Image (cartoon, coloured by chain):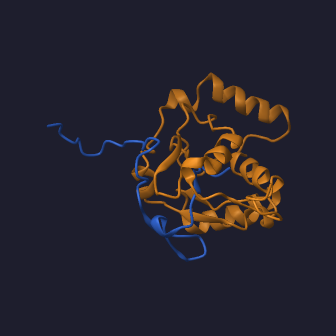
Chain colours: A orange, B blue
Amino acid sequence: MHLVQLHRFLYEQRIVAPVLAMSFAPVERLASWISLVLDEEMPREWRAHTRFVPDPSLRVYHAYGLGRNSRLRVYGPRVLLYYALRWLRGHGIPKVSEDPLQRGGDFVVDAGGRIALSHVGVDQADRPPVQRIVAALQSPRCSRPLEVEGRNPHQR
Amino acid sequence: MSKRIPGVLRIPSVGEPAPDFEATDVDGRAIVLSRQPKPIALVFLRHLA
């Protein structure tokens, strides 16, 4: 899961970075998912600086241009291959209770309030490598260096 | 002068101001993006598996 991969990378690199995880699921469903699914895959200490935000009206999703994908992109060959590989690895095919066509995306906002990374995948399996997200968080344009736990980032 | 078509969604590009928003997190706490510590990552999830 992309969100787990990002948090694992941040934790293993000892990088402290705030994350807003947006979901268009209702608040009760999101809270349930966090406790029943996410807690199984991600220790809470990994997400100490993360906040989960329900957006069932899609107001924020739409503010970031995230509408619905086409059925071809959701159920196209690349995505079918992705889920086939998941199934072969024993992860199973997830049951979906929300709109499977709603797009997701990844953004980084720099210290000046400007977009430093903008990634909306061409299909449902397309997410940026977590290293790219972290690189955007750490880029000079973000101006304020990220805190690295355990050591001063300015020390040489 | 270009005419804005209502209902057309536009993905913000690198370098543009990030659309500000107010929301409430799953714990009931208010969030205003412009008041959050930055840099910050926004991960918009798809359907919950």
Task: List x then y, in percent, for residue A32.
Answer: 68, 66
| Left or right: A147, with A57 as reference point | right
Give the residue displayed 71% in from the left and 42% down from the top: A131
Residue A146, quarter of the rendered image: bottom right
Give the residue displayed 52% in from the left and 39% down from the top: A120
Task: List x then y, in percent, for residue B21.
Answer: 42, 63
In the rendered image, the residue lying farthest to the top is A77
Task: List x then y, in percent, for residue A149.
Answer: 79, 64
In the rendered image, the residue lying farthest to the left is B1
Task: List x then y, in percent, for residue A153.
Answer: 74, 58
| Left or right: A87, with B10 as reference point | right
- Regarding residue B46, the answer to whether it shows in the image is no
| Left or right: A153, with A28 as reference point | right
Give the residue displayed 59% in from the left and 25% down from the top: A76
Q: Quadrant of the C terminus of chain A?
A: bottom right
Give the residue displayed 47% in from the left and 42% down from the top: B14
Q: Is residue A127 above or below residue A40?
A: above
- Regarding residue B12, the answer to whether it shows in the image is yes
Q: Nearer the viewer, residue A134 or A100?
A: A134
Query: How many numbered circles does the render carry?
Result: 0
Q: Is residue A91 above or below residue B32?
A: above
Q: Nearer the viewer, residue A148 or B9?
A: A148
Q: Is residue A4 above or below residue B1?
A: below
